[in-house]
Image (spheres, helix red, strand yellow):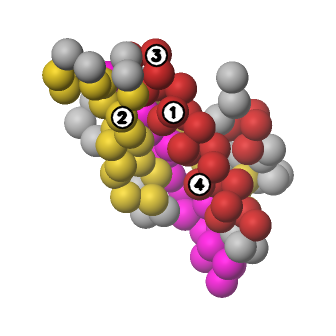
Amino acid sequence: MDVPIAKSEIIYCSTDGEELATVIQVGQLRQQDEQRWACDVEIPGVERKRTIHGDDSLHALILAMGFLADRLEYLVTTGASVLSPDTREPAPISKIVPRL
């Protein structure tokens, strides 16, 4: 992602125990046409860049944050874990990517 507007550092631990220091990234919102906005999200090394669409910029941003929370929650249910880089303790998804 070129220039994220927001980011959060994490340590991702895969189901096989491999650790990866990475950054959750939210890209700049952009208007695609008169009725659609887009927002890119990415977790390098964990989740490829995805473009999330909404009816306006706020809608696209909220959907993008929800997508990130959903993906992280799903990965945790498969046996992966997300650690705080400061404490190396498990980090609640709601503290990393809060839902509105």
Compared to residue 58, the image places residue 23 above or below, namely: below
Q: Quadrant of residue 33?
A: top left
- Mark number for residue 58? 3
Compared to residue 57, the image places residue 54 above or below, namely: below
Tell which of 44 and 38 is nearer to you: 38
Q: Amino acid at mark 1?
A: Leu
Whole-number angstrom distance, CA of label 3 to CA of label 2: 10 Å
Report helix, strand or loop for mark 2: strand
Residue closest to the far left: 33
Q: Amino acid at mark 2?
A: His
Whole-number angstrom distance, CA of label 3 to CA of label 4: 20 Å
Q: Quadrant of residue 67?
A: top right
Q: Earlier in the sequence, mark 3 or mark 2?
A: 2
- The question of residue 25 being in magenta is answered with yes
- Residue at 65%, 64% (x, y): give it: 75
Report helix, strand or loop for mark 3: helix
Compared to residue 40, the image places residue 75 above or below, namely: below
Q: Earlier in the sequence, mark 1 or mark 3?
A: 3
User: Label 4 belongs to which residue?
Assistant: 71
Q: Going by the image, does 87 lie left or right of 98?
A: right
Q: Check whether the beta carbons of the residues at disc 2 and disc 1 lie within 8 A of each other.
A: yes
Residue segment shown in magenta? 12-30
Front disc: 3 or 4 = 3
User: Label 2 belongs to which residue?
Assistant: 53
User: Label 1 belongs to which residue?
Assistant: 63
- Residue at 61%, 68% (x, y): give it: 19
